[in-house]
Amino acid sequence: MCKQHHYKEALDFYLKNPSIQLEPSTYTNLVLAWTNFRSLEYSRKIHDRILKSSYQPDIVLQNHILNMYGKCGSLRDARKVFDAMQLQNVISWTLVISGYSQNGQENDAIIMYIQMLRSGHFPDQITFGSIIKACSISGDINLGMQLHAHVMKTGFGHHIVAQNALISMYTKFGQISQASDVFTTIATKDLVSWGSIITRFTQLGYGIKDVYLFIDMLTQGVYQPNEFIFGSVFSACSSFVEPEFGRQIHGVSTKFGLGRNIFVGCSLCDMYAKFGLLPSAKVAFHQIENPDLVSWNAIIAAFADSGDANEAISFFRQMIHMRLIPDNITLLSLLCACGSPVALSITILSLLCACGSPVALNQGMQIHSYITKIGFDKDAAVSNSLLTMYTKCSNLPDAFNVFKDVSENANIVSWNAILSACLQHKQAEEAFRLFKLMLRSDYKPDSITITNLLGTGAELACLEVGNQVHCYCVKSGLVFDVSVRNGLIDMYAKCGSLKHAQDVFNSTQNPDIVSWSSLIVGYAQFGLGHEALNLFRMMRKLGVQPNEAFIKKTRFDPDITTWKTLLASCKIHGNVDIAKRAAENILKLDPSNSSVLVLLCNIHASAGNWEEVAKFRSLMKQMGLQKVPGQSWIEVKDKIHIFFSEDTSHPQRGTIYTMLEELWLLMLDDGYDPCHMLDINI
C-alpha cells in the first residue's frame, strides 16, 4: 500500500493490527508520507506505535520524526524527541532550528543555534540558511551581520543556500547594497537567487532595477522564470508611467507557458487595472485556468478601484454562481465600489453625472444584506467599510445602525469612521457624545480621532469644546503630533481665537505648510490682512514654499464661501466695485441666493446709490426671491441655542429681549450712533 501511495489506508490497517511487525524502511515511508500530509493526529499515532514496537529507531528515523513534528507545527513534540535522543548530529540540530524558524519562534531558533555551537557541533550550509532566516524574522540587523561574518569565517560564504538566505535577510532589512553584493558574488545563481532579489526589490519599490535584473536573467538563459518571478516583475511594471513594457513581459510569460497560471493572471489583473486598462485586465482574468477566490478578488478589486461598481458586482454574481464563498476581501472591494459614482444604466449614469456626486446606495444595501446572510456583518474590517459606504451615500442613520451592531467588536478605525461621518454631515453634538462614549469604553483616541473632533469644533466655531479637546491632547501627549497641532491652529483660527492659534503655532518646532496656511487664512478671514501678509512673507523668508496644500487652504480657486466672505468684507469697507464682482460670482454659482442681493442692496445704500437699491429690489420681486432669515447661534453648557431676527419662539425670549434692551441703552449712553441707512426691508 505504501508503494502505491495509499498511506492513510496503510496506517489504518497497521493501527488495527498491532501485532504486525514492520520493516524499518516501512516506518520511514509512513513518517515521510505524514510529514507531507502535515496531520498532527496521525503523526502522533505513528510515533506512538513506533515507541510501542520492538524496533529501536536509529538516528535517521528519529530525524525524520523531528522533521514530521516540525512540519506539523508541534515544536513541543519535536523538542521532546530531540531531548530524548541519545545522539544528535548536525541534521538533528538543524531540523529543530528550522522548525522554530518556520513556525515564527525565531528567538528559540537563535537560542538553539547557540546551544548547538556550545555542544561542539559544526553547522553546515543548511543550518546557516535556517538560522539566517530566523534572524531576518527577528529584525536584529546586528545579529544578522555577525552571522554573515560567521558564515564567511567557517567557509560556507560561497554555498548557494547560505547566500540565498543572506540575500533574503538583507533585503528584508532594507540593506539593498549588501544584498546586491552577496548576489554578485554567487558564482552559479539558481532560481531561488534570482527570485529572492527580484521579489524583494519589487516590494521595496525598486521597479526599474527589478526589471533590469529580470532582463539579465533572461539574457543568461540558465533558468526559466517561474510564476512568482513574473508576478514580481508585473508588480514592478505597474509603477511605470506607460504600460508598454508590462505588455511585453506579458508576452514573455505566455511564451513560457504561464499565461493561464493563477498567480500570473492575478498579477496581470492588478497591473492592467493600475494602468486603467480594464479590458486587458478582463482578458487576463478569462485566460486563467480554474480561477480561485484570490483570482476573483483581483478582478473584482480592479473594477471596484476604478469606480465601475456595475462590472464589479457582475463579476461578484458570476463568482457566486460558481459556488465560491466570498471572504472579507471580496466584500471590502464591493463596498469600495458602492461608495463611488455609479448607476445601473447609461441613462441613469448620465443623469447622476449631471447631478454632482451620487453613489450606488441601493447596490450597497443589497451587498449589506448578503454580508449579513453569510455572517460577515460582525467582521470589524467589513463593518468599517459599510460605515464608509453609508457615509459616502449620505445615509447617516444606517451608518449609525452599522456602528451600533459592531460596537462590541469595534476598533479605533470604527470609532474614527463614525466620528468622520458626523463631521461630514455636520452632526457636531453627536460627534462629541460619541467621543465621550469612546473614552468611557476604554478606547484610546489617536491623532485621526482628535483631528476629526477638532474639525467638528472648527465647523461649529465652538471654542469651549475646542479648549476641552486641546486639554485632552496635552494630557494624552497627542499635542506633539503635527496633524493634531495643525488641527488646533485651524480650530482656534476658525473660532476667532487668533491669539490661541498663534500660541500653538509658536510652540510648534517645525511648522509645515499646513501650519502656516491655517494661521494665514485665519488672519485673512477676520480682516487682518496686514498680519496675514506679514506671516506669508515670513514663511517665504524661512524657505517654506507655498504648495498645493497652501493653494487649497487659501482657496485660490474661489468657491461660494470665499466670495461671500469677500462680499461681507466689502460691506465693512464700503467697496462697491469689488462687491459687484463678488455678487456676480456668487449668483453664477447659486442664482437663487437672495441674501447676496440683500447684502448688495445694503452696500449700495451705504454708498447712497438709491437707484441701484431700487433696481435690485425690483429684480428680486421679478425673480420671486424672498430673503432667507438670518440666524445666529451660541453654545451654552453643551447646548446649541439658535436665534432669528425678531425671534419670538425661544422659551426665554422675555429675558433675552430685556437684556438686549439694556445693552441697547448702554450703547446709546456710550455714544453709539446706529446707521439706519442699512435697515432696508426687502
Image (spheres, rainbow, N blue to C red):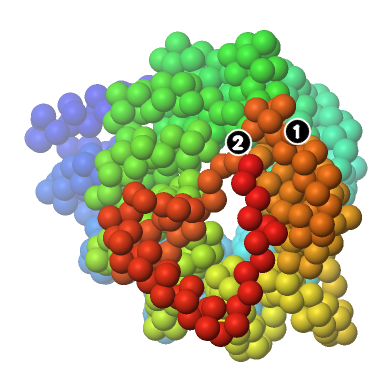
Toward the viewer: 126 or 537? 537
Q: Is residue 345 or residue 504 the one in the foreground?
A: 504
Q: Is residue 459 above or below residue 316?
A: below
Query: Compared with residue 408, is residue 319 higher up or lower down, i.e. above or below?
Result: above
Task: State the residue at coordinates (49%, 53%).
Answer: 645
What residue is disc 1 on?
A: 619
311 and 325: which is toward the camera: 311
Q: Position of residue 360 (x, y in %)?
A: 53, 25
Image point 52% across, 38% down: which residue? 392
Task: Check the picture and name the quadrant holding the N terminus.
Answer: top left
Q: Can you identify the residue that label 2 sits on?
A: 626
Any part of residue 265 in sight:
no
Residue 350 visible to the viewer: yes
Q: Position of residue 670 (x, y in %)?
A: 56, 85
SS class of the residue under badge 2? loop
Q: Which residue is rendered at x = 53% and y = 46% of the image?
A: 629
C-alpha span from label 1 to label 2: 11 Å
